[in-house]
Structures are given as structure tokens and as C-alpha cells.
Image: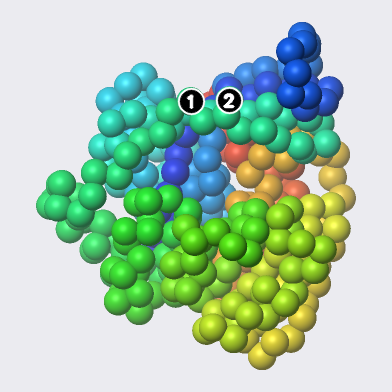
Amino acid sequence: MSEHVFISGPASWNRIVVLDHLPEPVPHMQFALEEYETVGATSAGKALGLVGLGRRVRLHALFGADADGARVKRLLMQAGVALIAGDGGVTERHVNLMTRAGERVSLFLSTPSDPGEGADAELDAEVAQAMADASALVLDLSELSRRLLPTAVASGRPIWTDIHDYDGRSEFHRPFIEAADAIFMNADRIGPDPLPFMRSCIDRGASLVVCTLGAAGAVAVDASMTRHEVDAVAVDVRDTNGAGDAFMVGVLDATLSGAELPAALEAGASHAASVLVTRHLHPSLDALLGA
């Protein structure tokens, strides 16, 4: 396949600390069950997933001239991800406090800054060309991606976005919701019934809205307001990081291959299951970092 998928958003270096329960907000001592370091962040996970499915990917992310940035870039490229690396001053780093049940608190230790349009004209031109040549654009939540939204819309390429645990009110998410053709989210903060919000996105012009429900699978609404559901694939869960990203790119890959929505949702559930059995964002990192 000649065309690639363009992805814009964060890639990070993460330290994962697994606990038997998340810390209470009081002074105390707690023992970790496990800890390790790995590649993190939503756009890195999506890029790794699409490459694993056989898609060509161009990932535009920000890094610093630091050891963590060099490590993340090297691992992504070894896994087959083509990078368009911008200068963010520092590389994004997290400490993720996790439980075996998938509960998570993410502590952001450093966050790169978008240098803005015009800071590197050659890079801007490379990004614009990569977007124009793409079969689909995945714009993940970040200042970098928000700046690219007008260019994405003007390209005429289908825009896919992941608004994660959107609460129905955040203004930062709104431009992504208004620009996207396909919107993915989870139900953590939207309320007991995500369907009214999902249908409102279709009313505003989206053609697909999908809400993942963890072990309960996912629910989707298409352009005709038809509701679809898919069950999660049962596996022995090793780690839940990246499962939502894997679900989204499984659906995207199947859609680009011409699958109807029910089959695409099944593909998403299957791909998510493949990530749940590794402690990394994708099994391809097992050989590079250790299973």
C-alpha cells in the first residue's frame, strides 16, 4: 500500500509503578509490586499498533535533545515507525501509578512545548506534505495537533481523533470534536450514558463515534444514527496501557481496508486484546525492551 497514515501527538518515556491499590491522599508508605520503564503516550501507541498491522505511518511528535528523547525515537524507529520529530525543548516523561485492575494516575514530569508555526519552515513543509499524502489523519489531543487542525481540514483527508475521558465540557477538546470525521472516547467521565453526546457529534457532522467500555466492549454510532456494539475479547490481562489506542487503530486499519463497521469494530476488539497481554504499548516492544 502506497499511502501512509499521518499521526500527530505525544510520545513519551514512562516509568510504570504497579501497586496493589492507588495511594490515598495522606502521608504513608506503600510497596510497589513491580516497576519498569517503557515507551508511552497515546500517539506512540497508535503508531506502533498501525505498523504492527502492516500500515505505513508518519508520526509527528515533539522531543527534547535529551537521553529520553533519543531513547524513545530509537525504539520507535526500530519498531518501524517513521518519525517527523519536532523540537519541544524537553521530552515528555510520565510516572504512571497503576493497579492490576487498570486504575491509573499519571504524573507528568516534563512536557514539551509546541514551537509554533514558522519556527522551522522546513519541518512545517514536511508535515504539510505528509498530511496531504496520507490516507487518514489521526490528531491526538495536544497543542501541536490543535495547531494543525486547519491544515487537516483543508487537506480533505478523513480526520480521526481520540478524546479519551472527555467530560462533555472541556473547551480544549472542542476543536477536535468539531473537526473530526471519526471520534473515539471512553466512558470514564462522560456520565452513565454516553449515547446522547455521541449522537450530538453525529448531528454536528461526524460520521462515526465510538465509546470504549473496558471489559464491557464498546458501543458505536454511525452516520445514520445506528447503534452498534462489540464485546471485548477475553484474555489474561497483563497491562491495560494502550488498549484504547489499539482498539482505535484496529478499527481504522479495517476501515481503510474497506470493512463495514461491525467487522471493523471486531477488528478493533481483537487488536486491543493483543496489547492487553504485554506490559508495553505494543508487543513489538517486547523484543526491544523485554517482555
**Mark identifier at residue 95:** 2
Give residue 195's quadrant in the image.
bottom right
Specify whether residue 287 is in view.
no
Q: Which amino acid does label 2 sit on?
A: Val
Q: Position of residue 228 (x, y in %)?
A: 77, 77
Above/below status of 15 relative to 282: above
**Mark identifier at residue 21:** none
Residue 133 horizontal side relative to residue 195, left or right? left
Q: Position of residue 146 (x, y in %)?
A: 38, 59
Q: Residue at x 52, y 40 (%)?
A: 41
Within-10-Å neighbours for mark 2: few <14, some 14–19, many 20+: some
Along the line of sight, which residue is nearer the eye, 170 or 69?
170
Above/below status of 42 relative to 216: above
Q: Are marks 2 and 1 in contact (CB under 8 Å)?
A: yes
Along the line of sight, which residue is nearer the eye, 128 or 115?
115
**Mark pair 2, 1: CA separation:** 7 Å
Above/below status of 86 relative to 19: below
Q: Residue at x 79, y 53 (%)?
A: 214
Q: Residue furthest bottom?
A: 224
- Residue tagged 1: 109
Q: What residue type is labelled 1?
A: Leu
Q: Earlier in the sequence, mark 2 or mark 1?
A: 2
Q: Quadrant of the C terminus?
A: top right
Q: Which residue is drawn at 28% across and 25% down?
A: 65
